[in-house]
Image (spheres, coloured by chain):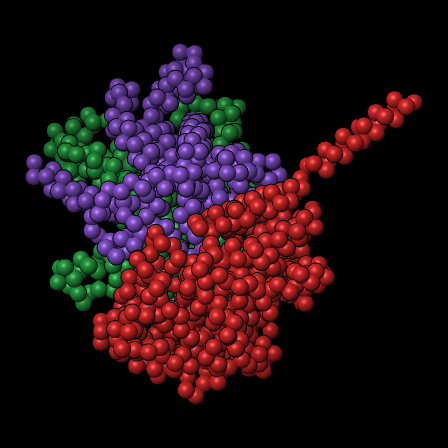
Chain colours: A purple, B green, C red
Amino acid sequence: MIKRKIIFFILLLYSLFSLFPFGWMVLSSFKTDLQIFISPWSLPESFNYINYINAWIKGNFSRYFINSVYITLISVMGGVLFSSMAGYAFSRLRSKLSNNLRQLFLLGLMIPGYVTLIPLFIILKNLGWYDTHLALIIPYIAGSMPINIMLMYATYQNIPQDIDEAAIIDGASPWRVFWMILMPLTRPTAITVFILMFISVWNEFLNVLIFINNPALKTLQAGLMAFRGQYQTDYASLFAALVITIIPIVIIFIVMQDKITKGMAAGAIKS
Amino acid sequence: MNGKILNKKWFTLFLLPALTLYLIFVLLPIVWASIYSLQDWDGIGAMNFICLQNYFKLFTDDPIFWQALVNTLVLMGISLVLIPAGLIMAIWLNTKIMLKSFFKTVIFLPLVMPSVVLGILWAQIYNPISGLLNSALVAFGLPHLQRAWLGEPETALLAILVVVLWQSIGFYVIVYLAGLQNIPEEMIEAAKIDGATDSVITLQIIIPLLSNLIKFTLIFNIITSLKYFDLVFIMTRGQPDHASEVVATHMYNQAFDLYNYGYASAIAFTLFMACVFLSFVLNRVFRRYEY
Amino acid sequence: MRKIVMSVCLSLLIFSSMVMAAPVKLSFWHMETMEPRKSTLETMVNEFNRLYPEIEIEALGIDPSIYMQKIQTAMAGAQEPDLFMFWGGGKLKPYVEAGKIAKITEDFASDHNWKSRFLPGVLGVYTFDQEIYAVPGEFQSIVMYYNKEIFKQAGLTVPKTMADLEEAIKVLKGQQVIPIAYPGKESWIGEYYYDYLTIRLAGPELFANIINGESNFSQDVFIEAGNKIVDLINLGAFPPGYQGVDYMTAQTLFVTGKAAMYLQGSWAIGEFMDKERMPEGFTQRVGLMNFPVFAEGKGDPTTLIGGAGMGYVMTEKCSNKSAGLKFMKWITEKPQAIFKSESVGFLTGVDIKLDPNKVSPLLLDFSEMVSGAARISPYFENVFSPAVKNAHLNAVGKIFAKSARPEEAVQLINKALAEEL
């Protein structure tokens, strides 16, 4: 079909355009700082791995990588679970209160981050979580609730309540309905939430830099500071470091996005 | 029995974790920040309660704020294009075309990268001396169109906007794609057999079924573009001469360069109230068009 | 009875030796996260810890991009460190006024050795109401670098007056060389151009009568300086599209020989020393020149804009101030100052003799410039409040963008000044 070919062509153009800056960064990561500025668009003279080695060592990446993975995974799992539960709750008990509480969650999106930094810091300090991983994980989960809940809620709304009713008649408790039936049905959205939250937590740097001092607890984003000085930036190593930090997310996305596209069993949601 | 599956006890149990964390770690700091907005405070020393004076100053004696507000509204207005664009791309990616996974990955890539990276990369593209854009213009025989993209007041905001759009579209594509998965293929097939064209299918089947999602993404789009900070700060810091200043960068400038922390909190809280108001209005509008 | 006494004595002995053996731990925050400044500081801290085993300085490097926020947030939550590095002047003032910083005036006055090793006047930016709050870790000035080779090839001598400079600009343009590498995106560098022009026109009394309220920024001096900037722009002194040129691009233009002159801080000397990232033999090609004077101006050609940069600060929260003072004293001793100058190419405000074999020739030039300067004029932000400095930044930005005439632009600064009083 011609239409499909046109669509393909447009998407192809956009993709090449999109890939360009990323490709430039990868190419530049093989050059030296001076080369990046003198001839930014040429191919590197040699595929010089030294930037990557420097980046890994100077950025203390072996330690930070593990921390990033651990913190991100825990935060994201908590985020998906709690928002799923909340989305289910909002969808299966419609009332004025339920509606208002749901709108309440949107408020969290409406404020710029820097202004809540000091209050959050004081709260975390009083809880004794300053300079611990909890200072990162818990606020990440809390902060992800607005988007996550809205996405999960919208999904639950699209699942007819006949399914719940049928299961309840069969004697299932709400928890069973949630866990055994609805969670599997909402998997595409859950995976979307997983991916989106993974990215935002993985890339988060403000909380990491302000709430964590202990070098053993820092994440990859904190490691990037080895390449930024007061005035100047070591772009070559920075780009190499950035490529290293991006690769895991890209891999996760490629692996998981297939799961989004595999639709769910048609039978269960036929209306 | 629509919407009455759960009783109050179960409702509370399921909601509790999310609500508790959110109240303590998101709402409480916001309330706290609103208290700061009523103070004369440099962020370091003692606070001095001055009630609404910060707000008076904001609305009567801060020309930069108004300029920032206009820029922010421009940002918000242009960002709205992400909704139809994201939806169309998601629909395309949901059809049978080749290289789907590749396209999805690439469209999503800008979202994966931290804003700092995007800012640096695009600052290089826009670099008047060694940048790709100017070089490309010369190569295509248009040397007179060269500009200092991020340095000139006329082009700075728009140059940043391009990057913001490019960064964010992946979000909408992936969210709409997930939503499209919930639409059974049989429905679409049946409609096609009945002779429906693509636009009819889109308008009369897809959009209604995705209405909750579209409503949410619309509100999300508006709210996040109103408070947008990252790329503006990284690429121009609001310069030149506040031409690319947005409300969030103005707030940052007040808080950390000028030690006007109380005043900055007032700016943030004003933005907050504006968002609350807008989402209230939007919800009203949606209720009229409920499917 | 004897046994009881013995065991009590033994326990006391063990207890006191445990207490004495446990070193005093002091937290020390800084933003040297990039080499070579990082290793230099770490080496010094380790050396101090080795020499003074009863004190343990725990140094923490913090990302420069959020350093100010981190310090501010920590203070708000009462988690500030015992020691940290910070700027003086307008940036330090709010902390001092909030009572968060420890005074060192008495200790300083009573320790002749400590007092005498600093060059005169460097502590000015750390002094508020006649109390001293910090000691310098670096001394920087804004200097005009120039490429000796390009000048030679163009047959130019170092410009002494603005007229010479304008001539040189014309010649350089004829040779397809960018006369001055100016990063227009960094408006704060534009401020230095403006400030140099004003002090070359007006001489040392420039800010005095503004501070005491006799005058404001509408004086001719400030308008003439603005006009001169517009002249330079119209002559094409700056790179094409300078408004969009950032710090690293401008520096690269200069470093790769595409631009002939470069107004920048003396910290760039340290950057130029980095053999890995600079072209071959670069430091041999660079020289320092005095910012030109106006023929009718009252300013001395050797006056430099500069002052102490980041210094060592002790907080009131520090539980063991004498230990903190020991560190502040030791790290500003001459051997440490020499080590720092040799490793990172900074002057430290400590009066030392540089070994020509061990330091960059540029640093030697700079050091001579500093000792030969008629006066060190303070940075604008160390004379005026952050609000006035911000207005100054905006005004200069408008002048460079040609979006306001100098007469209009200075009104912004006047307004901020008026609001202070």
Position of residue B276 measured from the top left corner of the image (x, y, whole percent): 46, 48
Front one among B287 and C306: C306
Q: Check the image and name the residue furthest to the left.
A: A2
Q: Quadrant of residue B96?
A: top left
Query: How many marks are shown on the rendered structure?
Result: 0
Q: Quadrant of residue C9?
A: top right
| Residue C134 appears left or right of A151 | right
Residue at left 43%, top 14%?
A: A172
| Up/down of B53 relative to C316, above or below | below
Front one among A152 and A121: A121
Front one among B28 and C390: C390
Front one among C3 and A45: C3
Position of residue B33 measured from the top left corner of the image (x, y, whole percent): 55, 49
- Say whether residue B215 is visible: no
Quadrant where the image shows the C terminus of chain C? bottom right
Q: Check the image and name the residue furthest to the front.
A: C357
| Up/down of C131 relative to B22, above or below | below
| Up/down of C329 relative to A178, above or below | below
Residue at left 50%, top 23%?
A: B10
Q: Check the image and name the residue furthest to the right.
A: C1
Residue at left 50%, top 35%?
A: A216
Quadrant where the image shows the N terminus of chain C? top right
Position of residue C84 measured from the top left corner of the image (x, y, whole percent): 58, 51
Q: Check the image and name the residue furthest to the top.
A: A170
Residue at left 53%, top 41%?
A: A213
Position of residue C281 measured from the top left corner of the image (x, y, whole percent): 32, 60
- Say whether residue C354 is visible: yes
| Up/down of B21 relative to B225, above or below | above
| Residue A260 appears left or right of A153 | left
